[in-house]
């Protein structure tokens, strides 16, 4: 197969799109937030009262109950969430600090996803010469 210019350009563009998404991963690290903590905070934000049970957190993120409990512990330890009990369920609720951090990260995440989408859309629109 002969590599034509648009093949090389398309591959380069996909690499640029991935670099944009990696920039968001770097922003998470700079904020002291893991990917999983970010996903958990997003889940809390979408729930009534910005809270979720540890069991629902486990189900939504496809985690074991014990791992979900440890994730809740980390969220609380980092002041991203508050913990309370309702009957026999442990509840984690997005804290004010968690909400502030999430707002900044989510804005950055959307910005990077839109940039990656534009790059990939342009790459896909380039004529293919097979």
Image (tube, grey):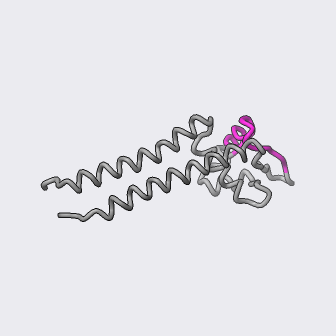
| Nearer the observer, 74 or 114 | 114
- Residue found at the far right of this picture: 87
Left or right: 1 with respect to 7?
left
Left or right: 97 with respect to 62?
right
| Nearer the observer, 40 or 111 | 111
Q: Position of residue 66 (x, y in %)?
A: 67, 44
The residue depicted at 68 percent of the width and 43 percent of the height is 101
The residue depicted at 60 percent of the width and 45 percent of the height is 36
Q: Is residue 25 above or below residue 52?
A: above
Left or right: 103 with respect to 50?
left
62 drawn magenta: no
The region drawn magenta spans: 69-85
**Label total for image:** 0
Q: Position of residue 35 (x, y in %)?
A: 57, 44
Q: Is residue 11 above or below residue 31?
A: below
The residue depicted at 30 percent of the width and 48 percent of the height is 12
Left or right: 102 with respect to 79?
left
The residue depicted at 38 percent of the width and 58 percent of the height is 120
Corner quadrant of residue 79: top right
Q: Position of residue 70 (x, y in %)?
A: 68, 40
Quadrant of the image containing the N terminus: bottom left
Quadrant of the image containing the C terminus: bottom left
76 drawn magenta: yes
| Nearer the observer, 77 or 23 | 23
Q: Position of residue 39 (x, y in %)?
A: 61, 50
């Amino acid at each position: 197969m002969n590599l034509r210019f648009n093949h090389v350009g398309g591959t380069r563009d996909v690499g640029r799109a991935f670099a944009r998404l990696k920039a968001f991963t770097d922003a998470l690290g700079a904020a002291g937030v893991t990917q999983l903590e970010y996903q958990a905070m997003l889940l809390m934000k979408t729930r009534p009262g910005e809270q979720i049970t540890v069991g629902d957190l486990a189900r939504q993120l496809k985690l074991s109950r014990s791992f979900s409990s440890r994730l809740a512990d980390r969220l609380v330890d980092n002041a991203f969430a508050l913990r309370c009990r309702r009957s026999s369920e442990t509840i984690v609720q997005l804290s004010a600090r968690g909400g502030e951090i999430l707002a900044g990260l989510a804005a950055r995440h959307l910005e990077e996803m839109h940039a990656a989408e534009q790059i990939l859309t342009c790459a896909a629109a380039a004529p293919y010469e097979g």
